[in-house]
C-alpha cells in the first residue's frame, strides 16, 4: 500500500453527486454544506467559482476545481451577476426542497425550463436553470466528498483551499464518461457516477501533485524515491511489525545510515518518528470505529504489546490519552 492510496481510501463518493445542472445565465448557486472536499467540473460552457474569502476562479469547459472545506462557495455566470443566490446542499438533488432541477445527475435535454423548488418562487423571472443545452448554457457537475477518519484528514492537510486542474491529462477520459452518464437516466446510474467521481478525484489530485513547480507534500515526492518509497510502502503495509531502522534498511537493501539520512531528507523526519505518527493515526480511527475494542486491543493492532506505552505515545502525538480521545469523538446523546 502506497501513502496516497492509504490516505485517500476514506474519501469516497456515496450518493454525492448532488448537482448536475444545465444553466442559462444569469445564475448563482450557493453551495452551503462546506463539505471537506467538493469537486466542481464544467462539461460545457463556463462560469465563475467564488470560494468564501478567496479570489474568484474562472471555470471553463472541461476544467475542474476542488474546494477544501469547511468554507462554502458560489458558482455564478459572471462576477456581479444579477441572479439571486440559490442555496444548494444535501437537498440539491430534490427540486421540491430547493435543489437543482436534475435528480442525482439526471440530465433531461428536452425537459421544461424550471428551477429550484419547481414552483413559481424561482425560474419564472427568466433566471436560473435553462432548457437543455441552449445557447450560452453551462453544464456543471458538483460532487461532495465526506472524509472518514483521521487517516484521510492527513490528505486534506496537504491540500490548498482551492485546487485547480486544467483540461488535459488522465482526467479527460473520466470527463468523457461523466458527460455520457449524466446525459441519460438509467438503472444503477448513481453507483456509476460515484465511482466516476472517485476516479476523477484521484486523477485530479495526482495531476495537481505532479505539476511542475508545485508545493507537493514531502511524502508524495518521497514515494518516487527507490529507497524511501520502498520504506514507506513497507511501513504502510505492515505498520504493526516490530520495525527498527536496521530492519527497515535490510528490507530496502541499503545501510542503516543511508536509509536514516535519505528518509529524513525526503520526508522531513526520521523513519521511526514517521511510523509512530502513522500508528497513532491508525489507532485514532480504530478507537472511534471499533467501540468494542479495548485500548489494549487497539495497542496490539498498531504494534504495541504494552498498552501503557501505547497510551503514552498516543497522548504525546494526539494530545489526549486514548480513552479521552474516544470520548471526545462520540456523538452527544440525543435529547
Image: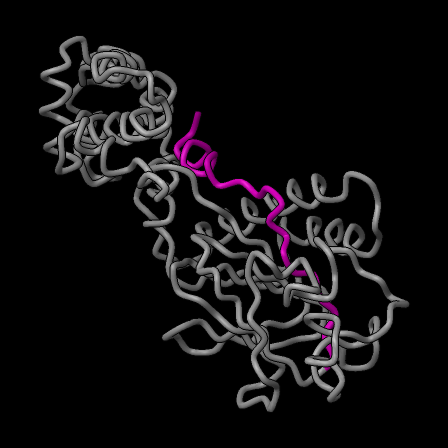
Quarter of the image with the C terminus is top left
For the question of whether residue 260 can be seen, the reply is no
- Residue drawn at point x = 18 percent, y = 15 percent: 244
Q: Nearer the viewer, residue 234 or 195?
A: 195
Q: Residue furthest front?
A: 335
**Residue 27 spot, x, y in % from top left:** 64, 80
- Residue drawn at point x = 20 percent, y = 41 percent: 268
Q: Nearer the viewer, residue 309 or 322?
A: 322
Q: Nearer the viewer, residue 46 or 318?
A: 318
In screen coordinates, is 101 left or right of 7? right
Q: Residue furthest right?
A: 110
How is the model colour-coded? one colour
In screen coordinates, is 158 left or right of 35? left
Magenta residue span:
1-24
Above or below, 14 against 50 in this view is above
The quadrant in which residue 79 appears is bottom right
In screen coordinates, is 191 left or right of 153? right
Q: How many marks?
A: 0
The quadrant in which residue 320 appears is top left
**Residue 238 spot, x, y in % from top left:** 34, 16
**Residue 115 spot, x, y in % from top left:** 72, 74
Above or below, 63 against 257 in this view is below
Give yes or no for residue 16 being in the magenta stretch: yes
**Residue 247 spot, x, y in % from top left:** 22, 12
For the question of whether residue 74 can be seen, the reply is yes
Q: Residue furthest top?
A: 305
Q: Nearer the viewer, residue 72 or 248?
A: 72
Quarter of the image with the N terminus is top left
In screen coordinates, is 292 left or right of 257? right
Give yes or no for residue 11 being in the magenta stretch: yes
Above or below, 182 against 296 in this view is below
Amino acid at each position: 500500500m502506497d501513502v496516497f492510496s492509504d490516505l485517500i481510501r476514506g474519501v469516497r463518493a456515496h450518493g454525492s453527486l448532488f448537482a448536475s445542472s444545465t444553466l442559462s445565465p444569469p445564475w448563482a448557486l450557493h453551495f452551503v454544506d462546506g463539505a471537506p472536499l467538493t469537486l466542481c467540473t464544467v462539461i460545457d460552457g463556463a462560469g465563475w467559482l467564488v470560494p468564501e474569502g478567496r479570489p474568484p476562479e474562472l471555470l471553463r469547459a472541461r476544467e475542474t476545481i476542488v474546494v477544501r472545506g469547511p468554507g462554502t462557495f458560489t458558482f455564478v455566470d459572471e462576477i456581479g451577476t444579477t441572479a439571486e443566490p440559490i442555496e444548494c446542499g444535501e437537498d440539491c438533488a430534490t427540486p421540491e426542497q430547493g435543489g437543482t432541477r436534475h435528480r442525482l445527475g439526471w440530465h433531461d435535454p428536452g425537459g421544461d425550463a424550471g428551477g429550484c423548488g419547481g414552483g413559481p418562487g424561482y425560474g419564472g423571472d427568466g433566471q436560473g436553470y435553462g432548457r437543455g443545452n441552449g445557447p450560452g448554457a453551462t453544464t456543471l457537475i458538483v460532487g461532495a466528498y465526506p472524509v472518514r477518519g483521521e487517516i484521510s484528514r492527513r490528505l486534506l492537510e496537504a491540500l490548498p483551499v482551492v485546487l485547480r486542474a486544467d483540461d488535459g491529462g488522465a482526467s479527460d477520459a473520466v470527463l468523457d464518461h461523466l458527460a455520457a452518464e449524466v446525459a441519460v437516466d438509467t438503472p444503477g446510474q448513481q453507483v456509476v457516477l460515484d465511482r466516476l467521481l472517485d476516479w476523477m478525484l484521484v486523477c485530479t489530485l495526482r495531476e495537481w501533485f505532479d505539476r511542475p513547480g508545485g508545493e507537493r507534500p514531502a511524502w508524495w515526492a518521497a514515494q518516487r524515491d527507490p529507497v524511501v518509497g520502498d520504506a514507506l510502502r513497507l511501513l504502510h503495509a505492515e505498520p504493526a511489525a516490530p520495525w527498527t531502522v536496521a530492519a527497515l534498511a535490510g528490507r530496502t537493501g541499503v545501510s542503516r545510515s543511508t536509509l536514516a539520512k535519505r528518509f529524513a531528507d525526503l520526508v522531513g523526519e526520521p523513519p521511526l518518528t514517521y511510523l509512530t505518527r502513522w500508528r497513532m493515526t491508525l489507532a485514532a480511527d480504530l478507537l472511534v470505529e471499533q467501540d468494542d475494542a479495548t485500548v489494549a486491543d487497539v495497542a496490539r493492532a498498531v504494534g504495541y504489546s504494552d498498552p501503557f506505552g501505547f497510551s503514552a505515545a498516543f497522548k504525546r502525538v494526539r494530545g489526549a490519552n486514548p480513552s479521552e480521545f474516544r470520548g471526545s469523538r462520540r456523538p452527544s446523546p440525543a435529547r
